[in-house]
Amino acid sequence: MRVLAWIAAALLAGAAQAAPKGACTVTSPQHTVALVELFTSEGCPYCPAADRWMRELPAAGLGRERVVPLALHVDYWNDKGWTDRFAQARFTDRQREYKALHGARALYTPQVMLAGEDTRRWREPEQFAADVQAINARPSRAAITLAIEPAEAGALRVRAQARTSSPETRPVPCCKLRPTRTAFRAP
């Protein structure tokens, strides 16, 4: 469920800022939206270019109808002289899970994962856009609806619903599925 929470936060971030006093609902499109994960760190000398690239995805025609971008700041750079204020051990754990899943030899930053696969084609805009287009061409395997509404004491309640027509169930790579409840507080 961690991935669903991250995707919910990404999809609802703009909507929550646009309408903080009202309810907002977002429904996934009928095509597959590509998950783009950037493993990065403020202490990494090569990461600013990747961070800039991710910020510029919407201007390159890769907005939220096509990609869900997540910048995941890892904590293994923190002992090299610069503490990343955004780093979280769970992001490093996620990168380690990918490493184990794909049999990689090392962790590195910046690392871009596209739909769960390591890609270095992010540096080639046309190639990356073509890879995203191939993912977008696939029909969605689930209809996901996320709703955000005001709760008590300035908190926001997020509700998620996923529907699929397939009776197939299988483990989701790199995710530990467990119920979680998170209360998001408006600034």
Image (cartoon, grey):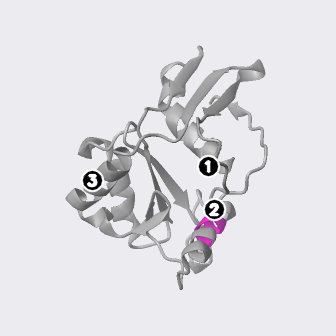
Decide which of tag 2 and tag 3 comes sooner along the chain.
3
Spatial CA span between label 3 and label 1: 23 Å
Report if the CB atoms under discs 2 and 1 are less than 8 Å apart: yes
Q: Residue at x 30, y 66 (%)?
A: 121
Q: Is residue 128 above or below residue 9?
A: below
The residue under label 3 is 129
Query: Residue pushed farthest bottom?
Result: 105
The residue under label 2 is 174
Q: Residue at x 74, y 34 (%)?
A: 183
Q: Which residues are magenta?
A: 91-96
Q: Quadrant of the C terminus?
A: top right
Q: Residue at x 38, y 36 (%)?
A: 65
Spatial CA span between label 2 and label 1: 9 Å
Amino acid carrying mark 3 in the image: Ala
Report if the CB atoms under discs 3 and 1 are less than 8 Å apart: no
SS label for mark 3: helix
Badge 2 crowding class, 10 Å Cα cut-off, few under 14, some 14 to 19, many 20 or more, is some
Dominant secondary structure (helix, strand or loop) of the stretch shown in magenta: helix
Residue 47 magenta-highlighted: no
Q: Residue at x 55, y 21 (%)?
A: 25
- Give the camera-side residue of 176 and 162: 162
The number of numbered discs placed on residues in the rendered structure image is 3
Q: Is residue 170 visible?
A: yes
SS label for mark 2: loop
Residue 95 magenta-highlighted: yes
The residue under label 1 is 3
